[in-house]
Amino acid sequence: MTEEVVEQKLEIEEPQEKKKERTNEAIVNIYTSFNNTLVHVTDMSGKTIIKVSGGMVTKHNRLKANPTIAMFIAKKITETIKDLGIGTLFVKIRAQTGNPAPGPGANALVKSLIREGYKIANILDITRVPRGGPKKKGGRRGRRV
């Protein structure tokens, strides 16, 4: 009986496969408007790893900027970059020029990446700000209605 117990313990205590350590870094460029979400992942030198948009994940035009679709985009990204050993991400979020806030998919996408086990080193808002611009329509006295 003791021999059987020892054999069972040996079977249980077999070494498990070690997880790959993720040491590489990547840049995640997120462009969110109120109509779509575009994500472009590059390595640190700027070489493209993967590009995913809302239209690649869903067939409904009205859902492309949805937070749920952003989670599916994050899932598609992680399937590609986990094999490359990427563990740290630098996130750059860009909204439409002049908009005060990014679209609804940005926060959901970053949260999904964190849930997948990636370390977010920093998050930058790189939204362009209009300065001056072309002359407004209407002339000196404004548009008369």
Image: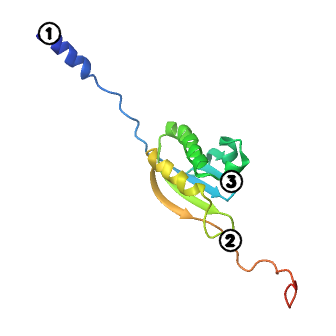
Q: Position of residue 144 (x, y in %)?
A: 88, 86
Asked whether residue 51 appears in the rendered view, the answer is yes
The amino acid marked with disc number 3 is: Asn
Q: Is residue 90 left or right of residue 143?
A: left
Mark 1 — residue? 3
Q: Is residue 138 above or below residue 84?
A: below
Residue at the disc numbered 2: 98
Q: Is residue 10 above or below residue 102?
A: above
Task: Note whether 101 is above or below 113 in the view shown.
Answer: below
Q: Nearer the viewer, mark 1 or mark 3?
A: 3
Badge 2 amino acid = Gly
Question: Foreground: 60 or 96?
Answer: 60
User: What is the distance, in whole Å, between disc 2 and disc 1 at their CAs?
Assistant: 75 Å
Answer with left or right where residue 71 lies relative to residue 54.
Answer: left
Estimate the x, y position of residue 101 in percent, counting from the top left: 60, 67
Looking at this view, name the residue that lies furthest to the left: 2
Question: What coloring was used for the rendering?
Answer: rainbow
Circle 3 is placed at which residue position? 36
Q: From mark 1 to mark 3, how far is it between C-alphas? A: 64 Å
The secondary structure type at the circle numbered 1 is: helix
Question: Badge 1: how crowded within 10 Å, few (<14), some, or many (20+)?
Answer: few
Amino acid type at mark 1: Glu
Gap between marks 3 and 2 measured at Cα: 17 Å
